[in-house]
Amino acid sequence: MLKKLLLAACLAGSAFVAHAADSAPAPATTTAATVIGKGVTPAIEKTVRQAIAKLSPDAGIDAIDVASMPGFYQVIASGQMLYVSADGKYMFNGELLDLGSRQNVSKAAWAKFRQAEIAKVPASQRIVFAPAHPKVTISVFTDVNCAFCRALHEHIAEFNKAGVAVEYMAWPREGVTTTAGRPTPTYTEMVSVWCASDRKAAFTAAIGGSAPKPATCANPVKDQFELGLRLGLDGTPTIYGPDGRVLGGYVTPDQLLKAIQDGSDLSGS
């Protein structure tokens, strides 16, 4: 089971529990550049970093921006959205609601961040199943040994028929390495898929239960796994819409299209 990365803002709690499979160690902090929003001065950035470091010196800070709530800054760190006071004395994690507009400010901010980060992944590093003229494109983090991922892919022809292009990215739930420092079996399989001469055929066979022919090459599997961690991903499949919203896990084509059209959230979070 994957552990949800948590922040415990109390003396008895622990901070930033590793978000990785039980069989794998915590992933190393990624070196992606921190996105700094307008209005965040170097002094504020320093204060925010110092506040986060008090709880976890190794936490990766991916974005700092001015929060909608006066006196606070919005921080995305190690897959969590946090709010830090301007003086660095107070911090909380959770969802921020705008009572005037009745909008979930945190979800909107997450969607914006995820949309920008996912857009950085080249199409050449994804496994794409698309109709000739797609109406909408979704990004799906997947694992070849995940039952619900398998169930989702069984409907790939229906998704394409409905005008939905599905772009897969790799997220081995076991993590990248075991506690002994060796590649996990699922990571190894997914590398073989991404290195196959026909990725689509290799993916379909692997997710159907046929082990792929062993292969190695320069591949994006580790980078995509770490991207998923930064996005707060905690299971597979996870579907992101074109606007960065989490649309759910296993869904039918009809459910997906409805969620995109009416702005509903199928993720349960």
Image (cartoon, rainbow, N blue to C red):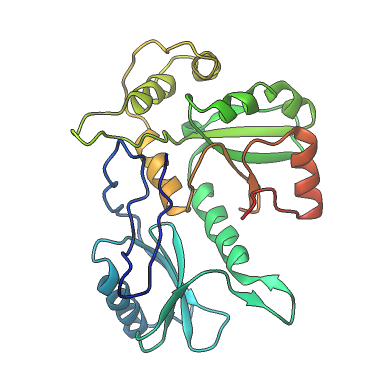
Left or right of 69, for residue 32: left
Instruction: Say which of 38 and 213 sits in front.
Output: 213
Relative image position of residue 120 (x, y in whole percent): 48, 48
Q: Residue at x 56, y 17 (%)?
A: 204
Q: Quarter holding the N terminus?
A: top left
**Residue extending farthest front:** 12
Question: Taking the image as drawn, is residue 132 in sight?
Answer: no
Q: Quadrant of residue 47?
A: bottom left
Q: Residue at x 32, y 28 (%)?
A: 218
Relative image position of residue 250 (x, y in whole percent): 64, 35
Question: Taking the image as drawn, is residue 217 in sight?
Answer: yes
Left or right of 128, for residue 171: left
Question: In this rendering, is residue 115 above or below 12?
Answer: above
Question: In this rendering, is residue 204 above or below 86?
Answer: above
Instruction: Say which of 187 and 166 sits in front.
Output: 187
Relative image position of residue 20 (x, y in whole percent): 36, 44
Relative image position of residue 210 (x, y in whole percent): 48, 10
Q: Residue at x 80, y 36 (%)?
A: 254
Q: Quarter holding the C terminus?
A: bottom right
Total numbered labels: 0
Question: In this rendering, is residue 35 above or below 125?
Answer: below
Question: In this rendering, is residue 160 above or below 20?
Answer: above
